[in-house]
Image: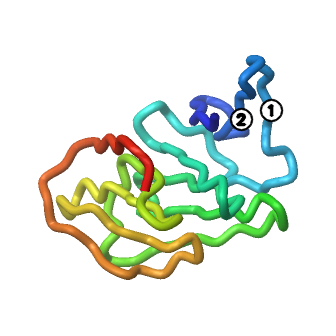
């Protein structure tokens, strides 16, 4: 399981089923301390992709954890990314709070589509 942290320079931790906490020490994160409502994360396990949002920079960071390569995704469709989760077919859904929409991204950062809906946070159940 991957969880967001706050007030730390390691913004994400992985927690094993045994409760062991691991940092993604080989990844370079933005050098700022996020408050709890400023950044969220998710992990696309099948693609080894860690996703981290920066709400006030209007940016979604995607990290290939096997190669330690980051990608910053900024687009006019991502305005105040508030929540993020794994979507269907190994994609990522980002709640764009200021646009009142959900942005659908590939793990490469491509933008196949968006959905205009007034959302605050999203919850995805089930497997796709």
Where does residue 71 sit, x and y in percent of width and height?
Answer: 64, 72
Residue, disc 1: 22
Residue at the location (60% across, 50% down)? Answer: 43
Q: CA distance from mark 1 to mark 2?
A: 5 Å
Residue 33 versus residue 75 in the image, above or below: above
**Which corner quadrant of the image does residue 101 belong to?**
bottom left
- Mark 1 lies on a secondary structure that is strand
Kindly identify which residue carries mark 2.
Answer: 14
Is residue 104 or residue 17 the one in the foreground? 17
Element marked by disc 2? strand
Which one is nearer the viewer's eye here, 25 or 103? 103
In the rendered image, the quadrant that contains the N terminus is top right
Q: Are marks 1 and 2 in contact (CB under 8 Å)?
A: yes
Q: Is residue 108 left or right of residue 91?
A: right
Quadrant of residue 44 in the image?
Answer: bottom right
Kindly identify the residue that appears in the image at 39 percent across and 77 percent down.
75
**Which disc is residue 102 wearing?**
none
Task: State the image coordinates of residue 47 (x, y, percent, origin top left).
Answer: 67, 64
Pick whichever, 48 or 54, lies toward us: 48
Q: Earlier in the sequence, mark 1 or mark 2?
A: 2
Disc 1 crowd, CA 10 A, few/some/many (<14, 14-19, 20+): few
């Amino acid at each position: 399981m991957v969880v967001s942290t706050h007030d730390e320079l390691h913004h994400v931790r992985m927690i094993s089923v045994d409760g062991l906490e691991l940092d993604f020490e080989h990844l370079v994160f933005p050098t700022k301390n996020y408050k709890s409502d400023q950044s969220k994360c998710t992990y696309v396990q099948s693609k080894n992709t860690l996703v981290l949002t920066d709400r006030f920079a209007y940016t979604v960071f995607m990290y290939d954890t096997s190669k330690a390569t980051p990608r910053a995704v900024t687009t006019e469709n991502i305005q105040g990314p508030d929540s993020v989760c794994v979507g269907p077919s190994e994609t990522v859904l980002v709640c764009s709070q200021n646009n009142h929409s959900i942005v659908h991204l590939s793990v490469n950062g491509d933008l196949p589509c968006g959905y205009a809906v007034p959302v605050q946070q999203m919850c995805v159940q089930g497997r796709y």
